[in-house]
Amino acid sequence: MTKLTESAPTVPVDLNPPAPGEPQPRGRLAIQNWMLGFLTLVCATYVLYMLRGVLLPLILALLVSLGFKPMVRALTARKVPVAISIVLVFLAVVAIFALLSTILINGVNAFANAAPIYEEKIVRWLGVSSSWVRDVLGRLGLEEYALQPADAVNLSAVARFVAGSLGGILSATGDLILASLYLIFLLMGSQTFPAKLKAAFRPEVSSRVAAALESIDANIRRYLTAKTLISLVTSVIVTIILLAFGVDFAIFLGLLTFILNFIPNIGSFIATVFPALVALLQFESFGLALVITALLVVVQNVMGNLVEPQLMGTSLDLSPLAILLSLIFWGWLWGLWGMILAVPIMSLVKITCENVEQLRPIAILLGSGPPGNQRR
């Protein structure tokens, strides 16, 4: 008898693909949709990068308008005309931005002036360290270790770093000025936008869009309010500690703490390390620098791990991985401002995806809880 052998199943090959007018197979459509989505994402990333000078102040102004919109409503409820209410809020925002910019610029200038003093201390420390290393290696009979401290710290490199930091802060100040101009138009447009939305779409569509916008507005405002309050209290406590020990640039470092605390995870770490390094270089005492660092760590942990969860709860409902990826992406795309705006932007994306049926799987992936807990 002839022994039959099993053969591997064959995959049918479509030798007659559908004509342009005929319907496409489901699998092919799925692949085409994914490829189209990927190309759209690449193009959108390029546009966001090229237009960062315009879009960044606009998004910043949008977030600021969400925070100050209740103030406009409170003033109008007290019979203050809308135009005057908007002007008052605008002046308050400009005053805050001007104060922040002044402290930042003065702090960077002071740091630039003190750079040679810190450089001299670093060179001296490196000289002592290199002498100690040479002695240890000589006792072990190894080749003598050579290090020129003056070559390790270059004043011109420090000057370039300070100049670059000052330029970045001046650029951020320009973004704040442009954001202030955008703000007044956003506040004016927000007064008539709900009526325009109802007139532009069918009732069921307008109600759904209005509900999505209201959810975005409420969640981001809650996040910004809580985060601003926590960052402000943290920066005030840090400033008091630094002033009590006589650390240089205490107010500037306190403002940096306020700004950096808006960056999830790594912001509080940088806000602790930088003052600790300044204290170490200023006092040249590891013990005193360690005490200051310990106090700053306690403040950051109490505010970040105990107070912040109580104020925020799970309002944004974002997974830690989504926050980390958003932090990396927007930091790469827009720098420091992108890292500060990463969480509000990701929250906006998630809430938008929740209200679009085709994008709801993305909202589930971005959420912090199991799929059953996602908002519908």
Image (cartoon, grey):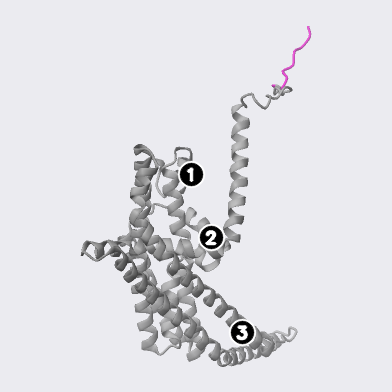
Q: Residue at x 56, y 89 (%)?
A: 115
Residue named by callout 1: 362
- SS under mark 3: helix
**What secondary structure characterizes most of the magenta part?**
loop
Q: Earlier in the sequence, mark 3 or mark 1?
A: 3
- In the image, 205 versus 240, the foreground residue is 205
**x and y percent of residue 164 in the render?**
59, 78
Q: Is residue 53 magenta?
A: no
**x and y percent of residue 210 in the render?**
35, 46
Which residue ends up furthest to the top in the rendered image? 1
Q: From the image, which quarter does the C terminus lie in?
A: top left
Residue named by callout 3: 158
* Residue type for callout 1: Ile
Counting other residues with Cα less than 10 Å from the Cα at mark 1, is it few (<14), some (14-19), or many (20 or more)?
Answer: some
- SS under mark 2: helix
- Highlighted magenta segment, given as a residue range: 1-9
